[in-house]
């Protein structure tokens, strides 16, 4: 990273920030003399430092520019001793990060390497007419990189990954309601904020950390199915993004809706590959599923 920019980040105590506010961005633009896109590109090494790449050693950083003006860092995450399909890409990490702050719209994605086909498909699920991709040497509209795309519109769905209706998961029995467990409710909130219009398998994960912080994840489904992001993948990418390690997890909870597909088995496997904390779980019925359509 540029030395002057590094000093500015240090001076304003922004070196460990993973979500830049509009105020942060103004400070950094003024101090560096860089324009918005040039600054975002210059900050990519910060995101790349968060990558977990035990398989490839290939670090990718991304920044999602939200409609609110906030910038969300993302990095690729690979899990050793698991199938490559468990990999989360930097663009997914950044968009998932923005989703957790309830961004409804993404203006641009800045990314350190050419976006792969998997990510182009994932980003198409935003269902936005215009999404700009900024690369170190060039920029494109997503529609230029993914012509004749298959997506939500092909399945008669009007909204996208970040602006769908909230869920209405309700506890199946009184035992679940009476157990006022903050971690379960955090996972339930994520499940209700998740995006699963095709399977209705709303799902959320909450990880409790030893310092009291939570790492959260929500399911972000895809019309093409495979590029979807599981709630455990997103929660684990948040863990690494914020500088934690799997040993910092003290509890883990998943909440999901009963549906034809399920997240829990895969989430258990992923968690078990990184630590020995058991995955606590609750399954909920969803009311008024049909009214979403
Ligand atoms: Zn990718």
Image: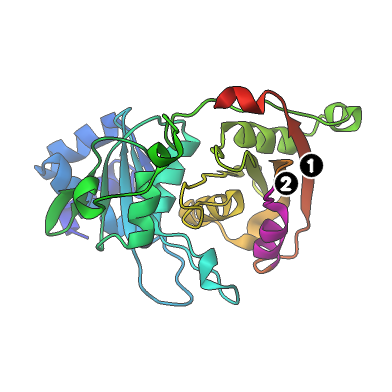
Asked if the stretch drawn in magenta spans residue 268, the answer is: yes
Observer able to see residue 16: no
Helix, strand or loop at label 1? It is strand
The quadrant of the picture occupied by the N terminus is: bottom left
Residue 282's mark? 1
In the displayed orientation, state which residue is furthest to the left. 33
Q: Nearer the viewer, residue 275 or 230?
A: 230
Asked if the stretch drawn in magenta spans residue 263, the answer is: yes
Circle 2 residue: 253
Q: Nearer the viewer, residue 123 or 244?
A: 123
> How far separated are the C-alphas under marks 1 and 2?
8 Å
Q: Are marks 1 and 2 in contact (CB under 8 Å)?
A: yes
Q: Position of residue 57 (x, y in %)?
A: 39, 76
Q: In the figure, is residue 60 to the left or right of 82?
A: left
Q: Position of residue 127 (x, y in %)?
A: 36, 37
Q: Residue at 18% of width from left, 46% of height from top?
A: 39
Observer able to see residue 121: yes
Q: In the figure, is residue 115 to the left or right of 181?
A: left
Residue 60's mark? none
Quadrant of picture, ligand 1: bottom left
Q: Nearer the viewer, residue 21 or 290?
A: 290
Helix, strand or loop at label 2? It is strand
Q: Residues within 10 Å of mark 1 (few under 14, many from 20)?
A: some
Q: Residues within 10 Å of mark 2 (few under 14, many from 20)?
A: many
Q: Residue at 59% of width from left, 73% of height from top?
A: 82
Asked if 136 appears above or below 69 in the picture, the reply is below
The quadrant of the picture occupied by the C terminus is: top right
- Give the image's coloring scheme: rainbow
Q: Position of residue 243 (x, y in %)?
A: 49, 55
Disc 1 residue lies near ligand 1 with CB under 8 A: no
Instruction: Write down the region rendered in magenta.
Output: 260-272
């Amino acid at each position: 990273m540029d030395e002057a920019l590094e000093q500015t980040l240090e001076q304003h105590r922004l070196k460990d920030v993973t979500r830049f506010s509009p105020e942060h961005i103004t400070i950094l633009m003024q101090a560096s003399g860089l324009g918005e896109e040039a600054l975002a590109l210059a900050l990519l090494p910060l995101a790349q430092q968060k990558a977990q790449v035990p398989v490839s050693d290939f670090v990718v950083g991304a920044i999602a520019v939200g409609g609110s003006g906030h910038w969300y860092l993302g990095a690729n995450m690979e899990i050793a001793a698991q199938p490559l399909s468990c990999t989360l890409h930097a663009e997914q990490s950044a968009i998932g990060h923005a989703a957790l702050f309830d961004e409804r719209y993404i203006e641009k994605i800045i990314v350190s390497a050419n976006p792969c086909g998997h990510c182009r498909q994932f980003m198409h699920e935003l269902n936005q007419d215009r999404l700009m991709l900024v690369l170190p040497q060039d920029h494109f509209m997503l529609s230029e990189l993914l012509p004749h795309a298959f997506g939500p519109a092909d399945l008669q769905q009007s909204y996208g990954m970040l602006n769908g209706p909230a869920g209405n998961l309700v506890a199946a029995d009184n035992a679940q309601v009476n157990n006022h467990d903050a971690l379960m409710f955090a996972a339930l909130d994520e499940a209700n904020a998740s995006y699963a219009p095709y399977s209705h398998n709303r799902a959320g994960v909450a990880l409790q950390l030893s310092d009291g912080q939570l790492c959260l994840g929500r399911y972000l489904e895809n019309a093409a199915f495979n590029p979807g992001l599981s709630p455990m993948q997103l929660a684990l990418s948040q863990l690494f993004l914020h500088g934690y390690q799997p040993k910092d997890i003290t509890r883990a909870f998943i909440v999901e809706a009963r549906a034809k597909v399920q997240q829990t088995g895969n989430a258990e496997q992923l968690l078990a590959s990184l630590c020995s904390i058991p995955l606590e779980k609750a399954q909920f019925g969803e009311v008024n599923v049909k009214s979403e359509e």
